[in-house]
Amino acid sequence: MAYEFYVTPTEYTIAESNGIHHKLVDQRVRQYGWDKERAITQPPKVENKTNKKWLKVAEKNGISYKTFLSRLKKGLSPEDASTLPIYYSDHKRRYPKEYTEKAKQLGIYRTFIWRMHNDWDIEKACSTPAMTKQEVGKIAKSKSKWRAEATSRKRRY
């Protein structure tokens, strides 16, 4: 029991006779923590050759590996998963495309989203340029109540 990770030469030959490579046996026992009996008797998974063929077709059609696999999981045949065109939808769009494009051109897309979340008018939100840190600081300084109190009080020292 002390050397569970040690695979004897006899066990390697048993694995070879079952069609299991010795490196796979080592990996199963030492990395995955399988017991030796299971590691030398359970046959390795066989790759699905048909999916590889259809995956190449999918890549030629501009369908990513991830999309291909998700289509297979949803129950599509490999042929359909690799040949059906990708469907893009605008139904999830929150704001009209022309406004988001205008905001992207001005480089304020994230600011536009924040402004819309904070109930700005859509036209103003996409056309008002973002302020620099200096501009924000000047406005904050001018509107600060502490600034007004400091100027109205006289120093007494």
Image: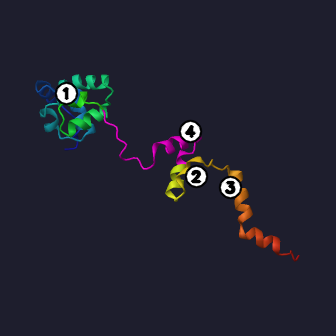
Numbered disc total: 4
Residue type at mark 3 is Val
**Label 4 residue SS:** helix
Q: At 13% from the left edge and 37% from the top edge, which residue is drawn?
A: 37
From this view, report whether residue 60 is shown above or below residue 42. Answer: above
Q: Secondary structure at mark 1?
A: helix
**Residue 28 image point, x, y percent:** 22, 36
The residues tagged by marks 1 and 4 sit, at their Cα atoms, a distance apart of: 40 Å
Q: Nearer the viewer, mark 2 or mark 3?
A: 2
- Asked if the residues shown at circle 2 and circle 4 are in contact, with their CB atoms under 8 angstroms apart, the answer is no
Q: Secondary structure at mark 2?
A: helix
State which quarter of the image contains the C terminus. bottom right
Between the C-alphas of marks 3 and 1, the distance is 57 Å
Q: Which mark's residue is nearer the viewer, 1 or 4?
A: 4
Question: Which mark identifies residue 136?
Answer: 3
- The residue at which mark 4 appears reads as 105
Q: What number is the disc on residue 124?
A: 2
Of the numbered discs 3 and 4, the one sitting upstream in the chain is: 4
Magenta stretch: give its range: 86-111
